[in-house]
Amino acid sequence: MRTHTGEKPYKCDQCDYSAARKSHLNQHLAKHTGEKPYMCGECGHRSAQKSDLFKHLRTHTGEKPYKCDHCEKPYKCNQCDYSAAAKFNLDKHLSKHTGEKPYMCGECGHRTARKSTLSKHMKTHTGEKPYKCDQCDYSTARKDSLDQHLAKHTGDKPYMCGECGYRTARKSDLSQHIRTHTGEKPYKCDQCDYSAAHKSTLKQHLAKHTGQKPYMCGECGYSTVQKCHLSQHMRIHTGEKTYKCDQCDYCAAQKSNLDRHLSKHTGDKPYMCGECGYRTARNSDNQPETCTGNTPFMCGECGHRTARKSDLSRHVRTHTGDKPYMCGECGHRTARKSDLSRHVRTHTGEKPFKCNQCDYSAAAKFNLDKHLSKHTGDKPYMCGECGNRTAGKGDLSKHMRIHTGEKPYKCDQCDYSAAQKSTLDQHVAKRTGDKPYMCGECGLRTVDRGHLSRHMKTHTGEKPYKCDQCDYSAVLKTNLDRHLTTHTGEKPYMCDKCGYRAAQRSSLSQHMRTHMSEKPYKCDQCDYSAAQKATLHQHMSKHTGDKPYMCGQCRYRTALKGDLSKHMRTHAGEKVHV
C-alpha cells in the first residue's frame, strides 16, 4: 500500500533520505558507512549489496540469465546485433537509436534517456555531494566517482585485461581498453561512415558536423565539445594541480601528465612497436607510423602530411592563427598547450629539467636534451642529403628546409614566408616595430627574448661556451661552432647549385642569394637593397651618419663593428689584411 500512499517510514539518521522499505534504507546506509561486505572470489571486487555482486559475477561468467518470454532468448536490439543480460540495459541501448530523452531538468532544460542520469545531473545544480571519502576531505555527487577516488588511496585495480595483463580501477576503463585488442568501434556517426571506440571520441567528431561547442571558458572564451576538456582547461587559469607524485614533489593538472612523469621513476614502457621493437611509456607515441612511413592525414592548405590526427590539428593552426591557450599573467596566447606550459615558466622561473652531470637546469625538456649532447657528443639525427648530424630531431627538421626550400611560416600581411618561426617573428617586428624585450643596461630593444639573453652577456662578460681544444671561449654558441670549424675544417652545409660548402647555415643562406639574386633587406630611405643584413646596416650609416663603434684608445669611430675590430689591431701591432 505504501506505493499508493507514498508513505516512507524508514528514515536515515545521517541525512534527509527516507524509504518505503527497510532493505532500501539498509542499502542507502552503506553509502555513509562505506561498508562493502560482498566480495568477488575471482578478482576481489567488493560491493555493498548482494544483488550488485551477482551482476558483477556475470562479467566473469558471461551469463545472460534474462530470457525473452516468447522466444527464450536474451534481450536483443531489433536494430543492431546488441544483446543484454537485463531489460533495463536494452532500454538504455535503444535510446541511442531513437534519440528519445523523456527526462528533463527543470533548471536548465537538459534532457536524458534515464531517470537515474537525471538524478545525477540534478546534483550539479544543488551542489549535493553525498558520497564522502573516509580517508580525506573529498566528496562527490556520484558513487562511481568516489570509487575511482578511493582507488588512489588503496591502489586497488581489480579489473584486469586477459590479453596483456593491463589492470585498472574501473570497469569502464577496462571495457575501453579491451577495444584496443578487438578493434571494436560501437559508436557510429549518423551523418557519415565514422565510428569510434569511445563515446567521447564520437562526440568530438559530431562537433565537426554541428560546429557546436557548448562548454565555454568564462576567462578567455575557449570553447570545447566536452565538459571534461573545459575542466582541464580551467586549471590553466587556476593553476590547480591535483595529481601528485608520491615519489617526488612533482604535481600535474592532468592525470595523463602524471602517468607520463611516473614512468621516469618506474622505467615502465608497456607499449611496444611491432615493427622495430621501440618501447614507450605512452600509447599515444605512435611509433609504427614512423617505421612504415604511413602519413594518412593531409593539410588541405599546403599538402603537409602527418602520421597522427593531433599533429595535423596543431599544424593547421599555423594557417588559421588559432591560439586557444592563454597565459593568465600577461595574456600571451599559444596554439599548443605545451607551448603555454613552457611560457608560464618564464613567469615562475621554474626549471624542472635537471642535468645529472652538472648544475644546468632548463625550463623545457628539449633544451635539456640539447645540453646533454654537449656531454655525450651524441648527434643521432643525420641529414640524408649532406650528412649533417644534429642532437635534436627539431634541429634536423629545420636543417632539411635548406634542401627542400620549404617555408611553412607565412606573414599574414604580405607574401613573405620563412623556414623558421623566429625568422618570421623578426620580419613581423619590422612591420609592427614591436620590440618588447629591453636591456636594462643600455636600453637595447629586441624582438626575441633569446637575443636579449645573448646581448646581456656582452655586459656581464660571461663566455659560457668553451673550446675543448684551445683556450677560446665565446658569448654565443654559434660563435663557438664557427670557431670549432677552424680545428676540424668541417663544412657540413653545401650549395646544391655549385657545390660551395660552408661551416655555418647562415653562411650558406647568404651564399644562396648570389644564385637567386635575392636581396631581402630594403633601405626605407632609398631604393637600395642588400643580400645581407650587415651590408644594409653599413649602407644605412650613410643616411644617418651614425657611428656607434668607438675605439677606447683614440677617437676613431665607425659604423661597423668589423671595422672597429680591424682598427683595434693597429694598436695591438697586428697587420691588418684589407
Image (cartoon, grey):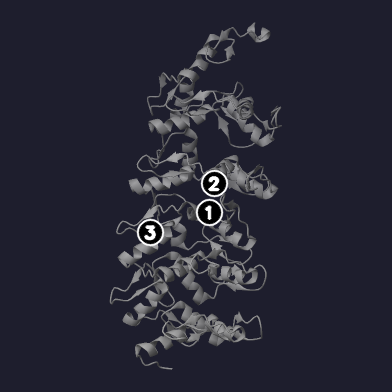
Q: For marks 3 and 1, give the CA distance.
A: 33 Å
Q: Nearer the viewer, residue 402 or 330?
A: 330
Q: Nearer the viewer, residue 477 or 316?
A: 477
Visible residue check, residue 78: no
Three-letter code, disc 1: Leu
Q: Quadrant of the N terminus?
A: top right
Residue 427, how many percent across, how many down?
Answer: 59, 72
Considering only vertical position in the picture, is 137 above or below 240?
above
Q: Does residue 96 appear left or right of residue 141 in this picture? A: right
Three-letter code, disc 2: Ile
Q: Residue at x 39, y 64 (%)?
A: 370
Residue 276, numbered circle: 3
Look at the numbered discs 2 and 1 and tell me whether their residues touch, using CB distance below 8 Å: yes
Residue 552, how many percent across, how many down?
Answer: 43, 81
Q: Nearer the viewer, residue 283 or 369?
A: 369
Q: For marks 3 and 2, give the CA distance.
A: 37 Å
Three-letter code, disc 3: Cys
Q: Residue at x 39, y 81 (%)?
A: 491
Q: Residue at x 40, y 79 (%)?
A: 492
Considering only vertical position in the picture, is 6 above or below 52?
above
**Residue that mark 2 sits on:** 236
Residue 305, how many percent across, how many down?
Answer: 55, 63
Q: Give the number of callouts.
A: 3
Residue 456 quadrant:
bottom left
Q: Residue at x 35, y 41 (%)?
A: 247
**Residue that mark 1 sits on:** 340
Residue 375, how many percent across, how many down?
Answer: 31, 65
Q: Nearer the viewer, residue 332 or 30?
A: 332
